[in-house]
Image: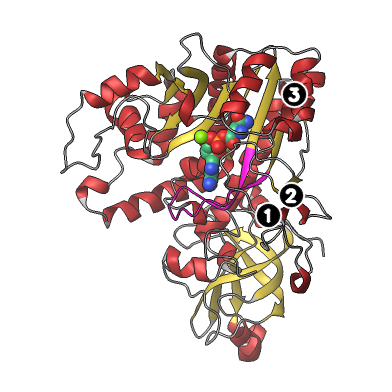
Amino acid sequence: EKRTKIKHVLSNEPLGESLTVMGWVRTKRASKSVAFIALNDGSSINNLQVVADAEKFGEELLRKITTGASISATGKLVESQGAGQTCELVAEQIEVFGEADPDKYPLQPKKHSLEFLREIAHLRPRTNTFSAVMRVRHALAFAVHQFFNEKEFFYINTPIITASDAEGAGETFHVTNFDLANVPKNDEGGVDYKQDFFEKEANLTVSGQLEGELAAMALSDIYTFGPTFRAENSNTTRHLAEFWMIEPEMAFYDLKDNMDLAEEMLKYLVKYALDNCADDLAFLEKRAADEDKNKPQNERAEMTLTERLRFVLENDFERVSYTEAIEILRNSKPNKKKKFSYVIEGWGADLQSEHERFLVEKHFKKPVILFDYPKDIKAFYMRQNDDEKTVGAMDILFPGIGEIVGGSQREERMDKLSQRMEEMDIPAEEMEWYLDTRRFGAVPHSGFGLGFERMILFVTGMGNIRDVIPFPRTPGNCEF
Ligand code: 4AD
Ligand code: MG
């Protein structure tokens, strides 16, 4: 028998037709004469009800059909009398693929906490919440490629093992093929990391940007979309040690062009989700609202999920310089009772996410693009402004999230770049390949990075970044 995915059964409702569906049992309600089985195959947030006559299938078979068991059911689709569904499958044949012992199967038909589900990350895709998040994640990944393809950007694969620390923040994971019993030693007797990857120093990439720049210097418009790794030991709801980043890089773009592209892309992704993930978003919106009811008043979201998505779609992003933002923050009185305590140290300080959220949610009430940051809190490759204090950086700030995008116009002037690298102790001899793009045919260019998981957090309304990636990697979390 040919299998029909439950999503198509539910959307086409081919009443009277004989169909075969396969999936996992969510719940079973049984009376003496009949069993109602809610079946899900991951194609939709919605289950198909399979009706099994008790006498026809017998107690022995029906006993095996418990939450988590996998079955195949063939039968006729009929109109349903029950509430909550318009059609159901009256089974003529049922096969059990795999049982799931109810005494041992951890997912019971009740609400499990997200903390508990994180401990069983291998099974949590079988819950409504995670399957919805994963379908949205897929849709957004697809939309990223579609957006750039429509714009005639080329998708470039940059290396995961690299010798550079693009952000220069020293937050890299070393890659080693050392024989641990025989680690090479340096002159002081310590581990000689200069030799750790086949006699060369190497680490996992923190960003594909620098290699992306090389490609943009030939193909004009490119993007990368791959895993990146940060060894920052921060345990927050917004940071992962392994996350996915989308990094476009464009020749002949200045900072304004860069902001325009980022705003257009973010709106495109939000619109794509609204147009293509309606059922999942409706489920997630209700979930977030239920979750909110258990929170103290001042921690509740001010917008529903749909309102937040519309907030991005329907507003022009407010473009404000870092210097103006600091003035705004300094003139705003801290208020301990509210969720923001936005005291800022002064010009030169980096913004905390509470400052970012204040600007978006309380002050401008729009997504915000902050630009022209102090050069000392930004990476070496950003283009220096004429004031000699700031660089052509831009961060995009979203409600509930804070920074979602970080980018800049790049320093294309060889003398300025070398000088900055010297000031920041970045050894030029290891970056000759990068400097060549400034020596030969240098052009103004720009790019940015979108943290994919932060985007999914925003679109799904989930509260913790560990719950929007199938296998989160955070300090102390790497079980398989
Ligand atoms: O601001 P970041 O560090 O910028 C870069 O890496 C640049 N090379 C990007 C570029 O211009 N091509 O990171 C970019 C984005 C952040 O805005 C944030 O959304 C996300 O990546 N991000 C993280 N997401 C999850 N966990 C972490 N530890 C993250 N660090 C950054
Ligand atoms: Mg950043």
Closest to the observer: 178 or 87? 178
Q: Which residue is mark 1?
A: 174
Q: Position of residue 189 (x, y in %)?
A: 68, 63
Q: Which mark is residue 202?
A: 2
Find out whether the residues at labels 2 and 1 contact each other: C-beta distance under 8 Å: yes
> In which image quadrant can residue 23 be found?
bottom right
Q: Which residue is mark 3?
A: 435
Closest to the observer: 55 or 225? 225
Q: Position of residue 453 (x, y in %)?
A: 55, 45
- Drawn side of residue 72 relative to residue 306, left or right: right
Identify the residue at image location x=80%, y=12%. Answer: 441
| Figure disc tally | 3
Q: Amino acid at mark 3?
A: Leu
Mark 2 and mark 3: Cα distance apart in space: 19 Å
Q: Amino acid at mark 1?
A: His
Q: Is residue 57 above or below residue 153?
A: below
Please state the extent of the stretch shown in magenta in the rendering: 227-245
Q: Amino acid at mark 2?
A: Ala
